[in-house]
Image (tube, rainbow, N blue to C red):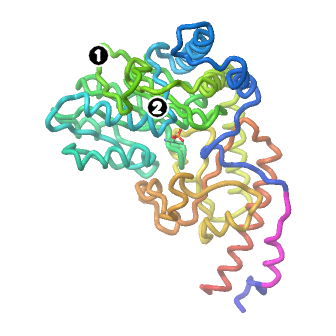
Amino acid sequence: MIPGCQSEGRFIMQFVEPETPIYLDYAATSPVDDRVLGAMLPFFGRTFGNAASIHGFGRVAAEAVERARAQLASLLRCAPEEVIWTSGATEANNLAIKGTVRASGKAIAHVITQATEHKAILDPVLGLRGEGVETTVLPVDAEGRVVPADVRSALRSETVLVSVMTANNEVGTLQPVKEIAAICHEADVAFHTDASQAVGKITIDMEGDQIDLLSVSGHKLYGPKGIGALVFRRSPKLRKLRPLIDGGGHERGLRSGTLNVPAIVGLGAACEIAAATLEEERNRLEGLRDRFESALMDSLPDVLVNAAGSPRLPTITNIAFLGVDAESLLLSMGHIAASTGSACTAASLEPSHVLRAMRLPPERQISSVRFSFGRPTSQVDILHAVGSIVKNVTILRQLSCISDPP
Ligand SMILES: *Cc1c(COP(=O)(O)O)cnc(C)c1O
């Protein structure tokens, strides 16, 4: 028996914790806000018209869609007619990338992105390699940030698009989007940003920051799943985009298919609510996040916050509990919903490509958990979660000292 380690049986009992669940996975998805649901309901019922029909039923639906367009545009500081409704951010990213490359008409086109993007950017970009497109995936620093000068040196005469996310979905790192967009503008290259995690959480100014294309996901900001948008700005030099889905010519011919009116209305309402509460929520969540991090660091040794040295989203923290396997920790606290990596790659059980790109030591990568906070998260949730985490990390560290003695 190693000193400090107790018998295994005693600990197993403590793993049974019938407690009320605490959801700390808002970066994976968020619940639909009651006000959003209320705004959507009539459009499943009496107001069921097709927004493309010219009669009264259609006009009512079309007006609701245009109101939602204005709500989204006002949150992002762009023009309503620049909004293209899609099925989500995955489709918006695909449209931005493939649509820009295909519209460029270049025999050889070059696309630049960076290593910590969501798979919904990396997969379409790397997929284009099969179609004669050249790609550059820029590295990040230890905080997960792209160095703007690296973008400048990667630009070529064939470059048609640079895509760098606004905020990372695993660690919350904010990218220097404004600086990168300015570099792209100087070179007359289109700039796209996947802002799925940032929309409604931090201020976004597409006009001021010279962002040409931006992807939005409804279900990350208390809207419904299966709706999103690509904002495609009428830049000083008119950029071109090719549709991925052809048909009835909806959305200026850039995305055909009957509009999902209830979901669009919901996303519009979600944007308006987010705009009205953005500053206040941002401060509140930043306070909760800081409290959560410092409580864990004060209570446990060897706790490290990943990307702590970078400007970050108020909603995400990614924390390494050295010596503890992150999956085991999540399994041991069944009532706390958090994740390792992103929900989309979680099924693959691969180590996080984000933490790897940040070149964190392997033992830090495998012991890292993402906790993400949202509108319903309270001070009490945070304190209860800290209590469970501290208890379970302590138990798991003692168990591992039984199984692999130092
Ligand atoms: C959630 C997410 C997506 C995917 O959005 P969907 O609307 O679910 O397709 C893309 N990028 C980032 C950064 C995300 O967080």
Q: Quadrant of residue 347?
A: bottom right
- Answer whether residue 76 is magenta in the image: no
Q: In what element is the residue under mark 1?
A: loop
In screen coordinates, is 90 left or right of 299? left
Q: Earlier in the sequence, mark 1 or mark 2?
A: 2
The secondary element bearing badge 2 is classed as strand
Q: Which residues are magenta?
A: 9-19
Residue 282 horizontal side relative to residue 14, left or right? left
Percent position (x, y) of residue 32? 70, 34
Q: Which residue is mark 1?
A: 238
**Front one among 326 and 20:** 20
Q: Between 349 and 207, which is closer to the camera in this rendering?
A: 349
Please determine whether, in this image, residue 114 is positioned above or below residue 303: above
Q: Nearer the viewer, residue 110 or 149?
A: 110
Q: Whole-percent x and y of residue 317? A: 61, 48
Q: Where is the N terminus found, in terms of image quarters?
A: bottom right
How many numbered badges does the structure rendering display?
2
> Which residue is under mark 2?
215
Residue 165: image location, x then y, percent: 44, 38
Q: Amino acid at mark 1?
A: Leu
Which quadrant is home to the C terminus? bottom right
- Kindly tell me whether mark 2's CB lies below 8 Å from ligand 1: yes
Q: Quadrant of residue 297?
A: bottom right
Judge from the rendering whether residue 71 lies leftward or rightward of residue 385; answer left or right: left
State which quadrant residue 313 falls in: top right
Lateral position of residue 156 relative to residue 66, left or right: left
**Three-letter amino acid code at the position of disc 2:** Ser
Mark 1 and mark 2: Cα distance apart in space: 19 Å
